[in-house]
Amino acid sequence: MSPASGVTVEFDHVSKHYDPREKGPGAVNDLSLFVPAGKICILVGPSGCGKTTSLKMVNRLIEPSSGRILIDGKDIAREDPIELRRRIGYVIQQVGLFPHLTIADNVAVVPRLLGWDRQRQVARANELLELVGLPPDRYSRRYPSQLSGGERQRVGVARALAADPPLMLMDEPFGAVDPIVRERLQNEFLRLQRDLAKTILFVTHDIDEAIKLGDLVAVMQIGGKLAQFGPPEEILANPASDFVARFVGADRGLKRLSLVRVRDLAPRPVVMARAGEDAADARRRTLADDYPYLLLVDAESRPIGWIHQRHIPESGPLTADVAEPMSPLLEPSDTLKDALGRLLAAGVEAGIVVDERGRALGILTFADIGELLRSGAQGST
Amino acid sequence: MLSHLDDLASRALQHVGLTLVALLFGFAISFGLAVVAVRHRTTYGPIIGISDLLYVIPSLAFFAALIPITGISFLTVEIPLVLYTLLILVRNLADGFDAVPSEVLEAADGMGYSRRERLRRIEIPLAVPFAMAGLRLACISTIGLVTVSAVLGDRFGGFGFFILEGYSRSFPTEIYFGALPSILLALAADTLLIRIQRRLTPWSRRASAGGPEEPRWT
């Protein structure tokens, strides 16, 4: 883990008013907030709440009517906007890749503007494509029109990271892809951010996304007013107003599940045996346990399937063919929300918790999750 | 027969020369006008309107009207030819700049492109397909119009010289002798421009240029 490479961002009584005759983006009213270095701050709210306007004031695509914005303590109004933008990563929902440039050239756009030599540009583009999961040998020479929506969005993120900016502005970056791709991109985004530790301002209208990704969440309401600002746990537990409570939804108890990860709960132990092991011994151990199933695993402890205690042979080696299909596999980094969803989808009571190498650690049941909800215990993030 | 071929070659050269000069100047003027029209929206209507209006002047009348000013000269031929290209080129170039998606411009601004860099590196390359479409039309129409300039005397007109001569002598073979090469020249020029466009815009060919097929979501 590298030390925080981000910068602080501060909105100091920032307002943006528009001519009432003009139909522009949402106005912003006396916004003050402070984002510590290396944190993800989500601006969330209904459309017209001024979240995008707020974001665009940070790279001066929109100028505030009053107030100051400070990056690393320095007032950005005194800086040259072109220079400023080259030091800030920018990702938008429609991506806006340049259709006439190859993927590698798209990624190297800011390095080229900054006058890096060609070799360094290419090396950086390759490094970033690798980072966002697009192998450069397959992708760097293609054009944007030859990519899927999800792939384009990855290129957009790589492009924004190209000059290693300490601050990233992201405007609904995952808004235009389907839910499955979105979830994958979100997870990869969190994984990336663990290493990069950028300061990130992230706009979304999706409260679930805000809770999942944010270290800090700024809930904004129509008229560009900040309704609440704090860590997601706090916003879910103590909404500051009726508006916030309505916006986070009646299911805010359930939403807290997305703040807790599988690794935060101790997996429930379960009787395991390797394929090929003596059935009699496994049978004895399973009968002694109150859970009626034996988990059959392979030589590397990866789960193969379940065997009900009645179906365990009385003698001989255990074989894979008596095992029933497996429960969903839950990884330590999965949120309990995702875990619960997977249990529901599979129609089973328990999922198998596995580590990064796929080795079975134990199980997680509906009952465990229900208990957590009742107790109101909160997870670490 | 040999002298005919000689004649044909020199007329071909003249035809190509007159066309090229018209296209070159026409494109340069149109480019400037299109940039102004797109940058300053209020000028868009007048600029397009005037370039449209020029086209309604009959070419014969245009040549005739210029004779008192520029005499029977190269300018008298080129001024109408250049102005006639404006109708097509200004409109196409302006459309080309307009067709650059707004998110591409927003991304460019957000990345820190200055206005000039954005025009040079983003807007102009993206306008190329439109510009080339305009250029192809303008090229074909100019090659046709060059023949009309034969009325200004045998120093002009390219292949039009043969057409006019054939007409005055009621000698239809010579009319074909002028018309056919003019048509062939237009077709050849068009093919060449298509080739150039393909070369300039590899990105607009959507065919799979690399890698295995990926699932598409959009």
Image (spheres, rainbow, N blue to C red):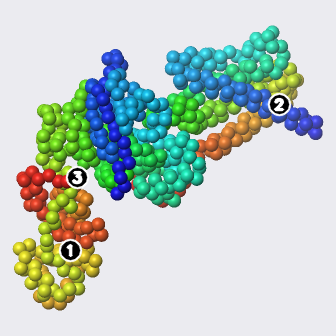
Q: Identify which residue, A30 or A90, lies in the foreground.
A: A30
Give the number of the disc on residue A381. Answer: 3
Looking at the image, is B173 positioned above or below residue A330?
above
Residue situated furthest front in the rendering? A73
Point 69% across, 32% down: residue: B140
The answer to whether one can see residue A185 in this image is no
Mark 1 lies on residue: A305
Q: Answer with mark 1 or mark 3, whichever residue precedes in sequence.
A: 1
- In space, the residues marked 2 and 3 are separated at their CA atoms by 78 Å
Q: What's the distance in space between the residues labelled 1 and 2, CA to CA?
A: 85 Å
Badge 1: few (under 14), some or many (20 or more) residues near its Cα, within 10 Å?
many
> Which element carries disc 1, helix, strand or loop?
strand
Is B100 in front, or is A17?
A: A17
How far apart marks 1 and 3 lie (CA) works out to 31 Å
Residue labelled with disc 2: B14
Which circle, 2 or 3, is nearer the viewer?
A: 3
Residue B84 occupies quadrant: top right
The spot of residue A66 in percent (x, y) is: 34, 22
- Which residue shows up at 17% across the image and 87% down it? A278
Residue B169 placement (x, y as % from top left): 88, 23
Res A169 quadrant in image: top left
The residue at the point 16 percent across, 43 percent down is: A234
Q: Is residue A366 visible?
A: yes
